[in-house]
């Protein structure tokens, strides 16, 4: 099913959102650092307002000698196991989040963690694994192997940002 609240014009995209309090349709150009937004109260005019916002942005950039930013569309297809897909969807639903927002947070955490990754990470993973062995009631078993530390750390990062785990 195609998302019908997304508009495209001259390579720029916007997601139209409805503000129930003011009965206003709003959008902003997605995927660029510059903030370009628009709003209108008439559904028939929303496309025109978006086009105007893009045209105004391009004209402004031309006037000030700035190269207009190009966007990354922000969507790509990935293939994962059906079981993982189901688990992620249930996690998102339970936490009143979209599947996209949960995956985006996990990817962001992964990217951020890997920006700062050092040689000490394997030592940290071993230390964390040992601490789980000590806290786990069965002396010679661990609830986490070293290979589990990285995914666990990412989910913990998501948890720490306000999403409850299943």
Image (cartoon, helix red, strand yellow):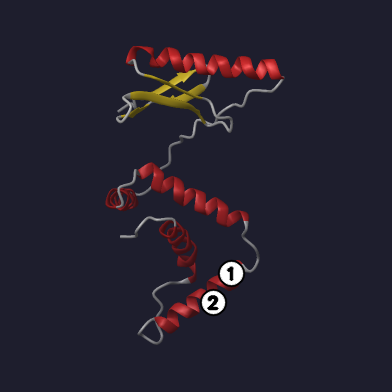
Write down the residue under mark 2. 127
Residue plotted at (47% across, 59% down):
157
Q: Secondary structure at mark 1?
A: helix
Quadrant location, the N terminus = top left
Using the numbered discs, state the Cα–Cα distance from disc 2 to disc 1 in whole angstroms. Answer: 9 Å
Disc 2: CA contacts within 10 A as few (<14), some (14-19) or many (>=20)? few
Q: Are marks 2 and 1 in contact (CB under 8 Å)?
A: no
Q: Secondary structure at mark 2?
A: helix
Q: Residue furthest bottom?
A: 139
Residue plotted at (59% across, 55% down):
114
Residue 122 is marked as 1
108 displayed left or right of 92: right
Q: Position of residue 117 (x, y in %)?
A: 62, 60
**Viewer-nearest of discs 2 and 1:** 2
Q: Position of residue 86 (x, y in %)?
A: 29, 49
Ranked by sequence position, the earlier of labels 2 and 1 is: 1
**In this view, 47 is above or below 68:** above
Q: Position of residue 63 (x, y in %)?
A: 68, 15
Res 124 → quadrant = bottom right
Quadrant location, the C terminus = bottom left
């Amino acid at each position: 099913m195609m998302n019908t609240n997304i508009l495209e014009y001259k390579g720029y995209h916007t997601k139209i959102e409805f503000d129930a309090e003011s009965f206003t349709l709003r959008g902003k150009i997605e995927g660029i650092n510059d903030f370009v937004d628009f709003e209108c109260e008439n559904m028939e005019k929303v496309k025109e307002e978006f086009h105007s916002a893009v045209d105004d942005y391009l004209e402004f950039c031309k006037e000030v000698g700035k190269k207009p930013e190009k966007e990354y569309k922000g969507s790509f297809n990935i293939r994962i196991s059906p079981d993982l897909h189901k688990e992620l969807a249930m996690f998102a639903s339970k936490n009143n989040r979209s599947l996209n927002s949960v995956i985006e947070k996990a990817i962001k955490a992964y990217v951020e963690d890997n920006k700062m990754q050092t040689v000490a990470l394997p030592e940290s993973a071993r230390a964390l694994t040992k601490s789980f062995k000590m806290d786990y009631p069965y002396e010679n078993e661990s609830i986490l192997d070293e290979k589990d530390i990285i995914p666990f750390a990412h989910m913990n990062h998501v948890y720490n940002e306000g999403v409850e785990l299943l």
